Image (cartoon, helix red, strand yellow):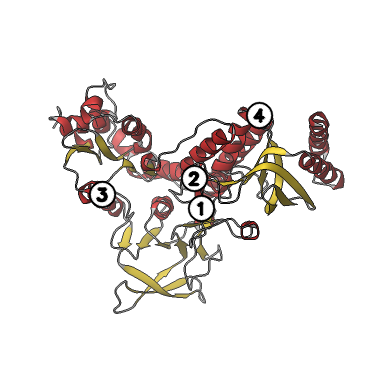
Amino acid sequence: MALAILARRRAAEAVARRAHAPGAAALSAWRAYAAAAAAEESDVVVVGGGPGGYVAAIKAAQLGLKTTCIEKRGTLGGTCLNVGCIPSKALLHSSHMYHEAKTSFAHHGVKISNLEVDLPAMMAQKDKAVAGLTKGIEGLFKKNKVTYVKGFGKLTSPSEVSVDLVDGGNTVVKGKNIIIATGSDVKSLPGITIDEKKIVSSTGALCLSGIPKKMVVIGAGYIGLEMGSVWNRLGTEVTVVEFAPDIVPSMDGEIRKQFQRMLQKQKMKFMLKTKVVGVDTSGDGVKLTLEPAAGGEQSILEADIVLVSAGRTPYTAGLGLDAIGVEMDKAGRILVDKRFMTNVSGVYAIGDAIPGPMLAHKAEEDGVACVEFLAGKEGHVDYDLVPGVVYTHPEVASVGKTEEQVKASGIAYRVGKFPLMANSRAKAIDDAEGMVKVVADKETDKILGVHIMAQNAGEIIHEAVLALQYGASSEDVARICHAHPTVSEALKEACLQTHSKAIHI
């Protein structure tokens, strides 16, 4: 049976390659392949091909489980790869290169005349990166013999998924175990309609056809600050409106304040403790009616583009979960046990669809752990040690507890801080704004949290993740030889300052 399915798959691929457009022969071949694949029951059926889903599928196949992955987009990688993490990082890098050329190159003896932004070329580079990576995942599926079904899947029983195929038609995929890995979607706000033209989500902000003169970002979280940074660097006047009193509420307070100062230095504007109470799109742009979060006098803020970045919500509606009795909380998150199983035997869930940080790397770890359990092994994810990164410039990365959290817990603690201004590598490359902060137990010296604001903080943080995972003390990290000169030495110095005293301050 498996050989027959493989033969149909290869035949479908051959027809598709010969076809200049998705004609009847190509579609018929793909449908025959999908139907043949569905006819044989899989050990694992993964609904959703994002970071959690495709990683779970590949890992399950590597563990010897017959695996099928269903993805509605027709391209793998989910929100992260298609319209999230990857394209946003491409634009963050490209816009940073332009900004550096405009503001910093001359200081390094590099002079450029007639500097300009070629937005279509910038977008093309982003799209090329996305296309290459999505094709790469398809290659990994083939390598690991994961059956890939393109379509929208809906559970009709704890062991069956009805799939409306992307190319038309329907098939039913059967599985002994079904993993829901459908991720999350943009969270909307009452009274604000996202049209992806004037009022955009993060998806729309990734593909604007021109550089707007003015942009308002509603929400001062990770995504809003990253996308605001992209357009700010390219010349847009960006104002961030946030209902809360602070940006990125989950961030360590001291780091947060310094981070906001850095963004303001880059000419981003902030209106905190402010809410949007009205939206007018009747003119060429958008007029927002604002008022203080606590109530008070209203004001009008105009923009060409408004980016709604108020967070994300689990994508769990319309999947047939209610019909088979899967329990969810009020936020629409699927409730699971420590083995990622729902209250319905044989149905599991991972990633943004369940409680925990809504991060791609958390979803990947969920996926691996879940299928390890299914294969009779042990899996584990410590949500307290999932690193978070804001990919602005400088980047902000953290793991573990903030100083505020440690203080609230009543634990006696010490704090060690080291400014990048005292780091030789950061000074040498003229990129020395930021700091490293370490919070450790006063009695045991065990590291409780690490917070970094620096260029490439997202790379440096993993040394701290490893340290916290294995219960290291600040002295442990301080006594490890770090290469010189590196920005990573700032972490060593901060640990020295926590345990005893830093050398270079």
What amino acid type is highlighted by mark number 1? Leu
Q: Which residue is mark 1?
A: 335
One can see residue 20 in this view = no
What amino acid type is highlighted by mark number 4? Asn
Mark 1 or 2: the one toward you:
1
Does dot 4 land on a helix, a strand or a loop?
A: loop
Q: Which residue is mark 4?
A: 144
Q: Which residue is mark 3?
A: 405
Measured from the top left, where is residue 93 in percent x and y? 44, 41
- Front one among 388 and 379: 379
Q: Is 278 placed above or below 240 here?
A: below
For the residues labelled 3 and 2, say whether their Cβ atoms are less than 8 Å apart: no
| Alpha carbon separation for disc pair 1 and 2 | 26 Å
| Alpha carbon separation for disc pair 4 and 3 | 43 Å
| Alpha carbon separation for disc pair 1 and 3 | 26 Å
Most extreme residue toward the bottom, as rendered? Answer: 297
What amino acid type is highlighted by mark number 3? Gln
Answer with mark 1 or mark 2, whichever residue precedes in sequence. 2
Quarter occupied by the N terminus: top right
Q: Is residue 487 left or right of residue 164?
A: left
Label 1: few (<14), some (14–19) or many (≥20) C-alpha neighbours in 10 Å = some
| Alpha carbon separation for disc pair 3 and 2 | 28 Å
Q: Which residue is mark 2?
A: 85
Q: Is residue 342 left or right of residue 359?
A: right
What amino acid type is highlighted by mark number 2? Cys
Mark 4 or 2: the one toward you:
4
Does dot 1 land on a helix, a strand or a loop?
A: loop
Q: Is residue 413 left or right of residue 183?
A: left
